DNA sequence: TTTGTATTCAACGGATTAGTTGATCAACTG
DNA sequence: CAGTTGATCAACTAATCCGTTGAATACAAA
């Protein structure tokens, strides 16, 4: 049940979670402090149950955590998870265009690797 | 057909696009320079057509663009789109916890707004 | 204990997604 | 021209996702 830190499953879920406008608005709201499910559901035209599911998606992505307060389950934003996302993006944000070499040259004249010698395992990570 | 800058549809698609490990690896590869569909498909165990679809998803999200080179369609990363994602995240990365007020007080004692006076339209954006 | 409030669970339908295979299109090569 | 390469289109399947409604749970208040 514990999350596996060597898998990128959390990263998958976190990006997908932020791909929904409802969930992004929830995150935006939570950045101003914790809120209950009812609070979070209020601005939306969808059912409370649907919002509850969205919160579960955010929780499984590690983006939020839940505490307990009587019958309420306050939701808190987990800023660390958001930082992981920016960290991933920042790793690839800068494009190394290799401007000294034209695109045609790149495509027709592979630098040092002959067509038979493929090295697919060190491509990248995550 | 032109993208509508006032909609967050692009943001939706971009986050969802990065939620797939295959597409993240494609982005990672493209950060080192443009590549053809065949190049991008090589490291994967899935069909070329599947990779072609992944590229279309990335393209519709604004994350990549395609050019033309004879029968090849080189794919280029669009760093601007990645920056938009980090920009969104950075807006909410810092949590304003309002530590001077306890969670219970937050929940049971709404600051200045009486329960009847709701103002849901300025909640947030995107 | 009964009632009310806050939230989740369960089952379902409709839409979307990621993969497949087979056919097609476009451009280069001999 | 015919053949090959690079990539897309089309049709299909299995799985997942987003929303619904109705029932169940947990705690509080009367």
Image (tube, coloured by chain):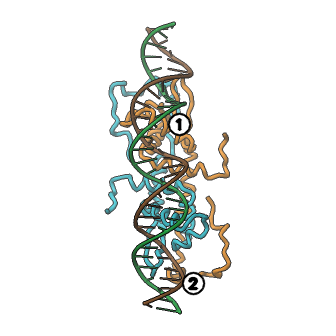
Chain colours: A cyan, B orange, C brown, D green
Q: Mark 1 lies on which chain?
A: B
Distance (Cα) linking label 1 and label 2: 53 Å
* x 45%, y 40%: residue: B26
Image location of residue B96, percent across then percent down: 54, 71
Q: Which mark is residue B109?
A: 2
Determine whether the residue tagged by mark 1 lies in a helix, strand or loop.
Answer: strand
Circle nearer the N terminus (1, 2): 1
* x 63%, y 67%: residue: B123
Task: Specify few, some or many for label 1: CA neighbours under 10 Å numbering under 14, 14-19, or 20 or more.
Answer: many
Image location of residue B5, percent across then percent down: 66, 49
* x 38%, y 27%: residue: A112
Q: Residue A116 carries which label?
A: none
Task: State the residue in front, C6 or B3.
Answer: C6
Which quadrant would residue A21 be assigned to in this image? bottom right
Task: State the residue in front, C1 or B59.
Answer: C1
Image location of residue A14, percent across then percent down: 46, 56
Work out whether C7 lies above or below B4. below
Can I make out residue A86 in this image? no
Say whether mark 2 and mark 1 are on the same chain: yes
Work out whether A109 lies above or below B112. above
* x 67%, y 67%: residue: B121
Give the position of the N terminus of chain B as an image quadrant: top right
Q: Is residue A44 left or right of residue A59?
A: right
Which quadrant would residue A24 be assigned to in this image? bottom right
> Which residue is denoted by mark 1 in the rendering?
B76
Image location of residue B57, percent across then percent down: 52, 42
């Amino acid at each position: 049940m514990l999350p596996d830190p060597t898998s990128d499953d959390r990263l998958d879920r976190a990006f997908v979670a932020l791909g929904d406008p409802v969930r992004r608005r929830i995150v935006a709201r939570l950045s101003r402090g914790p809120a209950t499910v009812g609070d979070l559901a209020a601005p939306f035209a969808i059912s409370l149950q649907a919002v509850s599911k969205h919160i579960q998606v955010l929780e499984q992505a590690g983006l939020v955590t839940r505490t307990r307060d009587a019958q309420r389950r306050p939701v808190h934003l987990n800023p660390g998870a958001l930082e992981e996302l920016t960290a991933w993006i920042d790793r690839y944000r800068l494009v190394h265009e290799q401007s000294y070499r034209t695109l045609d040259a790149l495509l027709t004249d592979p630098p040092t690797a002959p067509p038979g010698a493929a090295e697919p395992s060190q491509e990248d990570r995550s």
